[in-house]
Every structure is written in structure tokens, then in C-alpha cells.
Image (cartoon, helix red, strand yellow):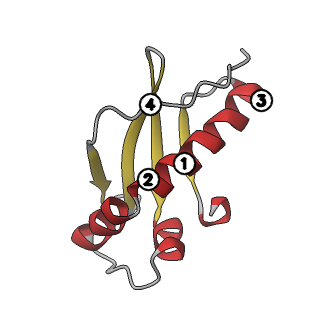
Amino acid sequence: MTRDAVPLQFPNPSRSYDPARRGIRFWGYDRTIEVAFFVEEGALAKVEPATATDEAGFLSTFDIHCERFRTVADAVYSQGTRAKQAFSFTLRATDF
């Protein structure tokens, strides 16, 4: 599957904290296809080194830097769909 140059859309501001994986989940849309993203703790800390390492801290960092996470998510998705047609992606510190 080759993806056109249409960026992902993020009409749903929902995000949630995953205590087992210690990070944030959020979703974007490629036309009508839902794409799941997970932001690792290390990525949150790289974007905001003063992030409190609890649910409130992770959510706050995500909210403050939401556009940056979405921009990186779009870039990671664009690379990944060309390679493997996946619809779930993890954003790591190395992506920032």
C-alpha cells in the first residue's frame, strides 16, 4: 500500500495513559482508517526533561507538546506504511 501525501488527521483529542507500558496512547486517521500510536516514556522525557513520571505528568507533557507528537506520528506512519502496512506505531525517543 502506498500512501498519498495526505497527512494524518487527528480529529479526536482523546489520549490515555497506559500504566503497564508507562506511556500515552492516541489515535489518528488516514482517511477512514484508524491508526493507533503509543508514546514511550523515554520520548516524553526527551521532549520535556522535567516530566513528572506519573500519569498526570505524562498526560500533561503530551498535552503541552501535542502538535509535536502528532507531527512525528505522521512522519513515522508515512515511513511505516510504505514498509509494512501497519496501523499501530510506537514513538520512541529516537524519533524526536
C-alpha distance separating marks 1 and 3: 19 Å
**What residue is pinned by disc 2?**
67
Element carrying mark 1: helix
Q: Nearer the viewer, residue 90 or 65?
A: 65
Q: What residue type is labelled 4?
A: Gln
Q: Which residue is drawn at 36% across and 61% down?
A: 62
The mark lying in front, picked from 4 and 3, is 4
| Disc nearer the start of the sequence (4/3) | 4
Residue matched to label 4: 9
For image coordinates 59% across by 24% down, the residue present is 6
Left or right? Give the position of 69 relative to 59. Answer: right
Label pair 2/1, CB-CB below 8 angstroms: yes
Q: In this view, does 53 lie above or below 55?
A: below
Q: Distance between the residues labelled 1 and 4?
A: 10 Å
The amino acid pointed to by label 1 is Thr
Instruction: Give the residue number, with chain letter if any, for mark 1.
Output: 71
Q: Quadrant of the C terminus?
A: bottom right
Place of residue 14 in the rendered image (x, y in percent of width and height, measured from the top left)? 26, 42
